[in-house]
Image: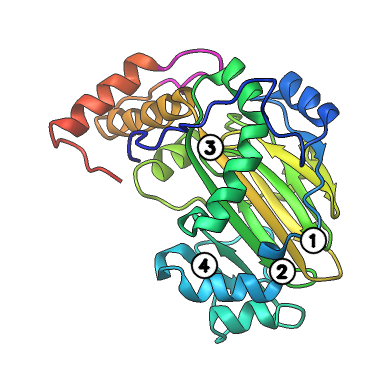
């Protein structure tokens, strides 16, 4: 995992920040719950022209291959490795999403100037609340998910602070407690931060602790760093926009996890990093030192 290199450079004051997408009540809820509590929000993104199917198909056909992923959507909640392909191209998958039985994700769409401007506007609305809790907003990124009816995004976790905005269709995101080894063992975190997969092993018993969030157009949900979750699409095709960012804390947590991987390889049974607001600085600095010396690989 690379150290933070992209810092948000557009601070705004309370008097000048935009108010067009997240209502004041949504920002109040976000401020109270961020960064560790999942919660629902409302947005007014609506039928944005950049988020229509043809615009997304055209974007996907221009993005580098490393920035697109599309797989079968008719899969179980738990999978081992990536689901199989459908045989369609990414453009065909998006244009035919209503019948393609697939899900697709366009990664780092901020590579395209228009989408970068959209991400900037959205995060500027929340920057004051973010900075008050976790400091500088680092590595802002955006991802767009296009899913067929009833498609499943399998059980996994992600390293970013994340807000998923539902634009078209419906879905249910089911979350589980972040940092709890019952739902994602420490070794899974350590593997991920040293180059392993984000998919997790599923157990039906986990549903006793599930927290489902039903999403329709105008709904959004906040996902804490590394909170395990899966997504099941509704009966129509779906478009969702995910806006993400990192923090000094999240990078410290990831590097501490990677350092624990090193320790485990030496025969130790290391203690898991602490969740926010605790600091994981010693282990994070140790791992960064090892990386700087070339003693561990840089993912």
Label 4 Cα crowd, 10 Å radius (few <14 / some 14-19 / many 20+): some
**The N terminus, quarter of image:** top left
Task: Locate residue 263 relative to residue 257 in the image: left or right.
Answer: left
Task: Locate residue 161 relative to residue 263 in the image: left or right.
Answer: right
Mark 3 lies on residue:
245
> In terms of sequence position, does the residue under pointer 3 or pointer 4 come before the other?
4
Label 2 Cα crowd, 10 Å radius (few <14 / some 14-19 / many 20+): few
Q: Name the disc covering residue 142, or none.
A: none
Question: What is the distance, in whole Å, between disc 1 and disc 4 at their CAs?
Answer: 24 Å
Kind of element beneath mark 4? strand
Question: What is the distance, in whole Å, between disc 3 and disc 2 at their CAs?
Answer: 24 Å
Q: Name the disc covering residue 52, or none.
A: 2
Taking 257 as reference, is 53 above or below it? below
> In terms of sequence position, does the residue under pointer 2 or pointer 1 come before the other?
1
Q: Is residue 80 magenta?
A: no
> Which mark lies nearer to you, 3 or 1?
1
């Amino acid at each position: 995992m690379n150290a933070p290199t992209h810092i948000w450079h557009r601070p705004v004051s309370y008097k000048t920040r935009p108010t067009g997408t997240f209502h004041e009540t949504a920002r109040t809820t976000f401020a109270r719950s961020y960064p560790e509590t999942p919660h629902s929000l409302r947005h007014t993104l609506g039928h944005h022209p950049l988020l229509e199917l043809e615009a997304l198909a055209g974007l996907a056909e221009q993005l580098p291959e490393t920035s697109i992923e599309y797989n079968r959507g008719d899969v179980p909640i738990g999978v081992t490795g990536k689901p199989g392909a459908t045989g369609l191209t990414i453009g065909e998958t998006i244009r035919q999403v209503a019948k393609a039985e697939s899900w697709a994700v366009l990664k780092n769409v901020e590579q395209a100037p228009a989408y970068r401007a959209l991400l900037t506007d959205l995060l500027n609305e929340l920057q004051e609340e973010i900075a008050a809790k976790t400091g500088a907003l680092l590595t802002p990124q955006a991802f767009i998910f296009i899913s067929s009816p009833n498609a499943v995004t399998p059980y996994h976790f992600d390293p970013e602070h994340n807000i998923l905005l539902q634009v078209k269709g419906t879905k249910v995101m089911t979350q589980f407690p972040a940092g709890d080894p019952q739902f994602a063992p420490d070794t899974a975190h350590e593997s991920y931060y040293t180059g392993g997969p984000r998919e997790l092993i599923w157990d039906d018993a986990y549903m006793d602790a599930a927290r489902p969030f039903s999403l329709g157009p105008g709904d959004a949900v906040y996902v804490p760093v590394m909170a395990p979750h899966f997504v099941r699409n509704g009966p129509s095709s779906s478009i969702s926009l995910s806006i993400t960012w990192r923090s000094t804390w999240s990078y410290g947590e990831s590097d501490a996890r990677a350092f624990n991987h090193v320790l485990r390889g030496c025969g130790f049974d290391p203690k898991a990093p602490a969740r926010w607001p605790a600091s994981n600085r010693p282990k994070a600095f140790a791992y960064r030192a090892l990386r700087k010396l070339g003693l561990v690989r840089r993912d």
